């Protein structure tokens, strides 16, 4: 197996950083991430080069999801959030590139190797808020709960971000995480990836599952919103990739033949099916289903 291929889930962080670096080079970039290339390194670019042509949607989704999450974070801050807890932070650089209050507490958590890579690469950079980096295996339930207790006890209003994290976890792990987050009254919001059942099938048909076989999606609940309802969370806001991309004027990079077929089929479909096509994946801003006193 070539060293350029994705070997494990942490490798996806290098891939995402490389996509953000490529976006930042565009004259019509939707955002600028000047540190992304430094973090992605040769590894990130090599991973992208190793992916099959049918994986082209991956880069587009990274860009659109970045814009979606940026907007959700800014919105949450205006609503009084004073702490961002970024679990499985990967090579995210929001504390450095976003316009954030200096008083905002931003805590990023990931595997020790990822945290050390970021510390070394960004040693000379200054974050725009109060950044804390914590090396922790989120699968360690006791350590995770201790961290959540510490964050909740020192915060007024917390937003938890798990960007591109839950898809790689089994359902029982996502349920356990949801229960842990919901048990802390200070945790008011949780941003989570959304994929429809149709999107999982598309990944398998398109070859993405084969390209990502060393970092497979494990979280495929039959009833996504029902799953989170049982875990104690309800959607406050949903941002779908296709709809947000339309607002951003950055359409998906499908070949023209696919776009033509989709357009024709769209005209023949009933409204509810057209809507479902546009809502195949995105991000959800959850809030606790039961309000804490």
Image (spheres, grey):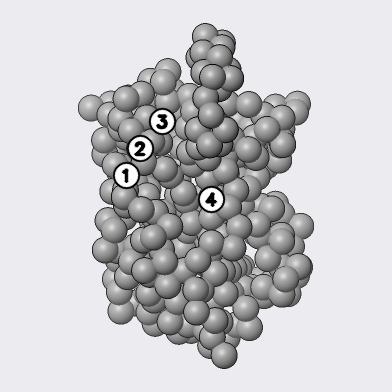
Q: Is residue 209 left or right of residue 268?
A: left
Residue at mark 3: 47
> CB atoms at circles 2 and 4 under 8 Å apart?
no
Residue at the (57%, 90%) spot, across then down: 293
In primary-sequence order, the first of circles 2 and 1 is 2
> CB atoms at circles 3 and 4 under 8 Å apart?
no
- x and y, in percent, of residue 46 in the image: 43, 28
Q: Nearer the viewer, residue 254 or 158?
A: 254
Q: Residue 200, labelled with which disc?
A: 2
Residue at mark 1: 217
Residue at mark 4: 283
Instruction: Name the image quarter holding residue 173.
Output: bottom left
Mark 3 vs mark 1, foreground winner is 1
Mark 3 vs mark 2, foreground winner is 2
> CB atoms at circles 1 and 4 under 8 Å apart?
no
- The answer to whether residue 238 shows anywhere in this view is yes
In primary-sequence order, the first of circles 2 and 4 is 2
Q: Is residue 2 above or below residue 96?
A: above
- x and y, in percent, of residue 62 in the image: 54, 39
Q: CA distance from mark 3 to mark 2?
A: 22 Å
Q: Residue 190, labelled with which disc?
A: none
Q: CA distance from mark 2 to mark 4?
A: 15 Å
> CB atoms at circles 2 and 1 under 8 Å apart?
yes
* Callout 3 secondary element: helix
Q: Is residue 92 above or below residue 26?
A: below
Residue at the (39%, 76%) spot, across then down: 180
Residue at the (71%, 40%) spot, across then down: 31
Q: CA distance from mark 3 to mark 1?
A: 18 Å
Mark 2 vs mark 1, foreground winner is 2
Q: Nearer the viewer, residue 172 or 8?
A: 172
| Extreme residue in the left direction | 1
């Amino acid at each position: 197996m070539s060293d350029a291929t994705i070997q494990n889930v942490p490798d996806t962080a290098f891939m995402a950083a490389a996509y953000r670096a490529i976006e930042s080079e565009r004259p019509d970039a939707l955002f600028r991430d000047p540190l992304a290339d430094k973090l992605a390194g040769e590894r990130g670019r090599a991973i992208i080069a190793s992916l099959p042509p049918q994986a082209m949607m991956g880069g587009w989704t990274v860009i659109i999801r970045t814009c979606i999450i940026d907007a959700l974070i800014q919105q949450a801050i205006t609503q009084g959030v004073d702490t961002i807890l970024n679990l499985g932070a990967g090579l995210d650089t929001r504390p450095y590139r976003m316009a954030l209050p200096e008083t905002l507490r931003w805590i990023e958590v990931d595997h020790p190797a990822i945290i050390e890579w970021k510390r070394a690469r960004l040693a000379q950079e200054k974050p725009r808020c109060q950044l804390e980096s914590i090396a922790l295996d989120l699968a360690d339930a006791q350590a995770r709960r201790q961290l959540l207790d510490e964050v909740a006890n020192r915060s007024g209003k917390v937003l938890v971000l798990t960007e591109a994290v839950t898809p790689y976890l089994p359902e029982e792990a996502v349920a356990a995480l949801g229960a842990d987050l919901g048990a802390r009254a200070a945790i008011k919001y949780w941003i989570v990836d959304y994929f429809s059942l149709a999107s999982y099938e598309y990944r398998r048909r398109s070859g993405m599952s084969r390209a990502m076989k060393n970092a497979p999606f494990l979280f495929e609940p039959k009833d996504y919103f029902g799953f989170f309802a049982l875990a104690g969370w309800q959607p406050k806001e949903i941002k779908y990739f296709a709809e947000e991309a339309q607002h951003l004027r950055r359409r998906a990079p499908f070949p023209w033949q696919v776009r033509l077929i989709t357009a024709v089929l769209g005209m023949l479909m009933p409204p509810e099916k057209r809507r479902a096509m546009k809502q195949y994946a995105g991000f959800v801003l959850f809030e606790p289903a039961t309000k804490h006193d």
